[in-house]
Amino acid sequence: MPLFPLCYNFLVTVQLLFSWNLLIFRVSANLYKSKVLILGAGMSGIKAADVLQSQGIRDFIIVEGSNRIGGRLLPATLRSGHTVNVGAQTVNQGGNWIEGTDGAYGENPVWTLAKSCNLSTITSNFDDNVYFIEHNGTFVNQSWPAVEKARNSLDSARRIIAGKVKRGEYPPSASLREALSDAGWHPTTPLDNAIEWYDYDFEYGEPPDNTSAQYSRQYSYFWGDREEMVVDQRGYNYVIEYLAMTFLSQNATGHINDSRLHLNAVVREIDYTGSKIQVTTTNEEVYMSDYVICTFSIGVLQKGNLTFKPALPQRKVDAIRKYQMVVYTNIFLKFEQKFWPFDNQNILFASDRRGYFTYHFNFAAAFENDPNWYVLLVTAEDELSKQIENQAEKETVGQVMDVLKEMYGSDIPSPVDVVIPVWYNNPLFYGSYSNCPNNFTMEQLEGMAASVDSRLYFAGEALTNTTVGYLQSAYLSGEATGLCIFGVETNNSQLKENCPGNLETTAFS
């Protein structure tokens, strides 16, 4: 062969490597193939993988946009100050409680996991409360007559609503606000508003005005009233890591090193026009598979940064757009001194501004005044949370400290460390968890959960027909999706019958 063609081929190869054609070269060099591709390593994705593995389908890849397993169970560290020798604490920016342990649906699977991995928890007592009433500057306890009167009135309304929900009497248009009003609950004072907020906003992440009466069932409806706050220093996310370690390989130090787990891979496009579904990341890595499980949050699906080719069926798109992704912010403040005089677990600020930093969890009470845990968890949500994410941390800390100074006096110390999570502006989540709005039907929920062409599947805490927004919801959704794909792949008619609905397209035939 003449020398010139060899040199020419070499020069072309170099040009491909060092020109704009590098992009094409990278795509071909980073092509991954599998039977099933799972997008997301939160609870739904990991549980789906667990089911597939247990059923003999080991040819899967888990693609995760962050550098860790755990999804919205996101730990953070509160560090000590300089004048007192106290250690650092792991706190949970996302979920903090195991919501229900055992009830009509049996044992909560998250509680089962927590016990299996010896997760440290503290039983929460949500009747152990003290209220500070802003307009008259006084603290009152649970037995104060005004509290008892409001509490009894709201409890009566809740019982009426629960009965109607079980009988399916509310139309899709009915909000919890309408249901509460019809049941005789009419809040008029800051204390009334704080008690209502504690029962509803604290759970759903937004006011009763925006929440469905019929489909907003709380965890207690299925798994009982007991709640366990996770205080394990491995973080709440450890329950998902623990589940993953039961089927993903690890190195000698116990860290997962399974080649089927791909971290730091943010998906930008899902193309299901061909015989194989092709998924492309922002780093131009390409994955091809027979089945894809999308476990993205409703917030991510609503945002539009993720491209589907072809576009998802309009029924699914309309349902996703109508659903709600709430923003719920847990603000942790660590102090060197305990200046609040209470040993109650729960302190509530009955502000003239409804929902303004209403709930404070007292870690010192939970840990019997251990100096390591002079920590307050102060909550914000909805529009207040969005405001917090769009302002400087210093401004948020100042707002919270103004509330604490009003409650305890102007001479209280400043915190030595603060954790303020970002959910609304986080491109991996765009919100904290989902909530079912009024004017949302069961048919729309089914459309949102439906697969597309029996190969593009969706799972997550929003996509169950029981409770939405809970960790067990994500677990059950992932479990059901894994079993569904196994049923389709093996033509198991019984498992296929339990699959969510399917929306057919003409993308590939």
Image (cartoon, rainbow, N blue to C red):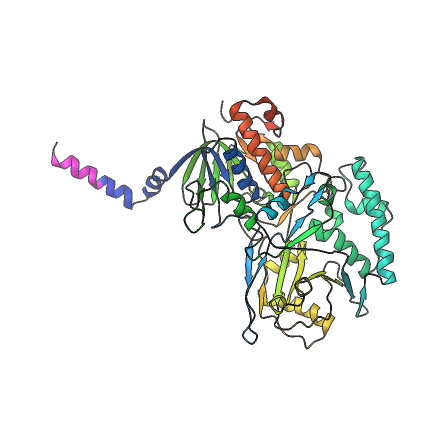
Q: Main structural element of the magenta stretch: helix, strand or loop?
A: helix
With respect to residue 9, does 379 lie above or below? below
Q: Position of residue 53 (x, y in %)?
A: 50, 35
Q: Could you tell whether 251 is left or right of 331 in the image?
A: left
Please tell me how many numbered marks the rendered image carries: 0
Question: Residue at image x 68%, y 70%?
Answer: 402
Residue 454 seen in render:
no
Question: Residue at image x 77%, y 42%?
Answer: 213
With respect to residue 283, does 235 lie above or below? below
Q: Position of residue 68 (x, y in %)?
A: 49, 50
With respect to residue 107, does 357 lie above or below? below
Front-lying residue, 327 or 203: 203
Residue 486 on the magenta span: no
With respect to residue 464, does 157 lie above or below? below
Q: Position of residue 185 (x, y in %)?
A: 85, 50
Q: Could you tell whether 354 is left or right of 291 in the image?
A: right
Front-lying residue, 413 or 454: 413
Q: Position of residue 331 (x, y in %)?
A: 63, 61
Question: Residue at image x 53%, y 49%?
Answer: 427
Residue 66 seen in render:
yes
Question: Residue at image x 78%, y 54%?
Answer: 196
Quadrant in the rendering for residue 353: bottom right
Front-lying residue, 373 or 461: 373
- The magenta segment is 1-11
On-image quarter of the N terminus: top left
Front-lying residue, 357 or 361: 361
